[in-house]
Image: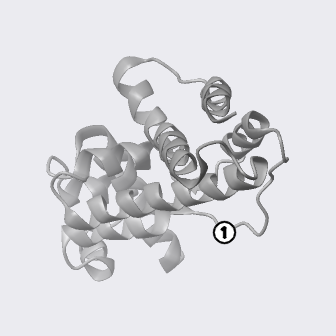
Amino acid sequence: MVIGDARTRILDAAEELFAGGGYAATPTAVIARLAQVPGELISHYFPRKIDVLVALVDERTSVEEEGDVDAVPGDPAGTLARLARRLPLRASPAMRRILFREADTHTSVKERLGRLNRELAARTRVALGLALPGARGGAARLEVAAAMFAAVLIYQENLCQLTGHQIDPDAVAELIAHSLV
């Protein structure tokens, strides 16, 4: 067995268990059993259980860097729809559940969720600015529209998990675009 492979299995198991039952309800012994590693190996990689959660959040959630924004001047709805389809947020549905579940009790998780939201809003703001040069109402309206769209992109997995209702990002893109033109 490769050492790095064991660490990955530990994180995979923790992601599954934390998403299902929560951080507090998941003993490291259960993580070890699911990961098929000795309990001492978890302590080797992660001296405290909180270190497992921090590693998950740091390593498995990010907004991917992209060079160019795929924006078409005069087409804010299409620009937002393309942004949603090429969602630059790297976080599995399980990781999104963990972020929301643990944000209330773990400061580092709350901070990461805030950073992800700000990064997506900034990316959306740039895309809208390119799609709508000189938009009616200017920067303040673009800021609100970007914040709303970022919220939908981040929170849709949680809403679906809680209610079973899937939000259509294209419909949201269309709604936001109509409010800006």
Tell me residue 176's x, y (percent): 60, 32
Q: Nearer the viewer, residue 39 or 158?
A: 158
Q: Nearer the viewer, residue 113 or 102?
A: 113
Q: What residue is rendered at 61% in x and 25% in y?
A: 175
| Residue at x 64% of width, y 23% of height | 171
Q: Is residue 67 visible?
A: yes
Tell me the amino acid under the disc marked 1: Glu
As drawn, 98 above or below 37: above
Asked whether residue 38 appears in the rendered view, the answer is: no
From the top left corner, tell me how far across and down residue 47 is, in percent: 22, 79
The number of discs equals 1
| Residue 85 found in image quarter | top right
Location of residue 45 (image quadrant): bottom left
Say what secondary structure mark 1 lies in.
loop
* Rendered-image quadrant of the C terminus: top right
**Position in image of residue 155 (x %, y %):** 43, 38
Q: Quadrant of residue 11?
A: bottom left
How busy is the neighbourhood of tag 1: few (under 14 within 10 Å), some, or many (20 plus)? few
In this image, 63 relative to 23: left or right? right
Measured from the top left, where is residue 167 in percent x and y?
54, 24
- Horizontal side of 123 relative to 62 (left or right) equals right
Residue under label 1? 65
Q: Nearer the viewer, residue 61 or 132?
A: 132
State the residue at coordinates (72%, 51%). 134
Residue at 77% across / 48% down in the picture? 131
